[in-house]
Image (cartoon, helix red, strand yellow):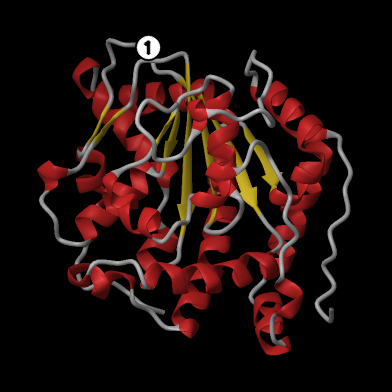
Amino acid sequence: MKRLHHYVPIDDIVGRITYNPDVELPQIVLGIGPVRSGTTASLRVYGQSGVPAYSQPIKSIFRHLAKGKPLQECGWAIPAADCIYIKETLGLLNAEESFLNPLDVLFQVIQKGLGSRGTGKDVIHRSLDLLASKVHVVVLGRNPFDSWYSVDGTLRKLLESISPEESWYYETTYVAALESHIYAYRSVDNLRSYAQHLGIPVSHYVAEANTVADVAYRRLFQRIGLPMEPRVQGWTERSLVGVPESYVTISSDHSAQQRAGLFEQVNQSSGVKFIPGLGARLAPAIKNKIVDAGLLQIYERWLLNTKAELDIDFHVDLNVNT
């Protein structure tokens, strides 16, 4: 598995995110999943519904620093708002991306902000209380066969669109990328357990629930406690990804993805669409590696939780021998 030579301490990431304790922390819906899990469409759902949505603010800071760029040229401030949506994905270019823990980063950002209002255990307890009352983690997933098939094609597009000076960061091998993808799934599941251990509410939403998106998102919003009706159809410029004045904000680190056209499909869509994956085309050896790594077991747990939490039903073909 590819690893970075340049170490990025979590303190450096935390140091580039600001939280003003004099302003009430917004309700934060933190959606986390492995790459290529249908997460980009979720940005448009929240944005179109009037919830400011942010694409990978934490991972973008990590990538900026991992590329050796100056600290001063990146950063993010938790905005003053009633509610925000943060979409973070783990993987897949190196091990560090797969093991990144955005929830822990948020925890430490809040601790840092409250540090001027107290010390020691008091700050830790108050930070945990804020996390439990203000943050709702949504585990985002997808059939791992379909997810990896999508990764393979997307990676090829991305590698054709990177700038020469950053090629060292993006270039990887098929084997290394698959290993990183496997660890990303495991990391998301560990993050789920970590959130529950801290008393932070957790929900699940697998991409296949988009076959019944109207009821699935409505019940997800209700479970989170969002008062608005989710806009899964009728998307407008209000929620375009990577467009000024949109409710969806991306960072400058997304420039390679924009050049590769990775946002085109979701931006050209008028609503949530379930597009069946092509994981059945994977070679049997790759499928077996995914199964042996435990990804199918992890996904099945997310799938069952999605159905139970949202009281919905839909079919997913998980036949490894397809």
Foreground pick, 277 / 87: 277
- Picture residue at 48% right of the left edge, 83% below the top: 174
Locate the C terminus by quadrant.
bottom right
At label 1, counting other C-alpha atoms closer than 10 Å, the crowd grade (few under 14, some 14-19, many 20 or more) is few
Q: Position of residue 55 (x, y in %)?
A: 42, 41
Foreground pick, 147 / 49: 49
Q: Position of residue 153 (x, y in %)?
A: 54, 72
Locate the N terminus by quadrant.
bottom left
- Picture residue at 76% right of the left edge, 75% below the top: 280
Residue 94 can be seen, yes or no: no
Under tag 1, what secondary structure?
Answer: loop
Q: Which residue is mark 1?
A: 24
- Picture residue at 54% right of the left edge, 68% below the top: 151
Mark 1: amino acid? Glu
Q: Position of residue 87 (x, y in %)?
A: 48, 41
Total marks placed: 1
Left/right of residue 123 with respect to residue 183 in the rendered view: left
Residue 11 can be seen, yes or no: yes
Left/right of residue 115 with respect to residue 260 in the rendered view: left
Left/right of residue 277 with respect to residue 125 in the rendered view: right
Left/right of residue 89 with respect to residue 110 in the rendered view: right
From what the image shows, is residue 189 above or below residue 50?
below
* Quarter residue 300 falls in: bottom right
